[in-house]
Amino acid sequence: MNLSISLTVNGVRRNVELDDPRVTLLDLLRERLDLTGTKKGCDRGQCGACTVLVDGRRINSCLALAVSLDGADILTIEGVARGSELHPLQAAFIAHDGLQCGFCTPGQIMSAIGLIEEGQAGDDPERVREGMSGNLCRCGAYAGITQAVLDAQQTLTEAKQGRAA
């Protein structure tokens, strides 16, 4: 039995035929849509490497069935930059050495974008660490990640205030 779903992925409407209702969003993104920036780490929702934004909310894509997301708006790491211009979080990760091996970086960045958009980042390092606690980094780049999120939060707030003026 084939199931047809429609998703908006990184601003592009995608119609997908699923031959198995058990396909996760992670597997759909990586194997069918060739968006391999979203990583398969633990495949159990414990590491955060597969974090994407669905309708503006952070989710572990390894735990979400694709069929349940019919009509959803999905943002992956591939849709974050604007052409050759990095998103402020991507630039901040580079500036603050928020990555080492890079495997967890896409999930970390997507989680940080969600954290900031949810208004949960603030300017307190402990609050950022708590908000990012679902994303693991085996290399231990947590200090750089926290600084990157704080820096990007400030950059995005200043940009928003500049647009409002």
Image: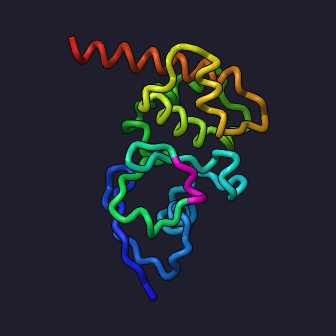
Looking at the image, residue 73 lies above or below residue 128: below
Looking at the image, residue 47 lies above or below residue 144: below
Image spot of residue 132 (x, y percent): 61, 32
Q: Quadrant of the N terminus?
A: bottom left
Image spot of residue 83 (x, y percent): 38, 38
Q: For residue 27, which quarter of the picture?
A: bottom right
Name, please, the residue furthest toward the bottom: 1
Looking at the image, residue 90 lies above or below residue 78: above
Is residue 6 rendered to the left or right of residue 52?
Answer: left
Count of marks overlaid on the render: 0
Looking at the image, residue 10 lies above or below residue 15: above
Is residue 100 rendered to the left or right of residue 109?
Answer: right
> Which residue occupies 56% across, 47% down?
51
Q: For residue 163, which quarter of the picture?
A: top left
Name, please, the residue furthest toward the right: 139
Using the image as rendered, state which of residue 127 and residue 24 is in the foreground. Answer: 127
Using the image as rendered, state which of residue 74 and residue 123 is in the foreground. Answer: 123
- What type of secondary structure mainly makes up the magenta span? loop
Image spot of residue 24 (x, y percent): 55, 65
Image spot of residue 118 (x, y percent): 43, 32
> Which residue occupies 36% across, 57% down?
72
Q: Quadrant of the C terminus?
A: top left
> Which residue occupies 37% across, 65% down?
70
> Which residue occupies 34% across, 57% down?
8
Instruction: Inspect the magenta stretch and tell me whether residue 133 lies in it.
Output: no
Residues rendered magenta in the picture: 59-63
Instruction: Inspect the magenta stretch and tell me whether residue 62 lies in it.
Output: yes
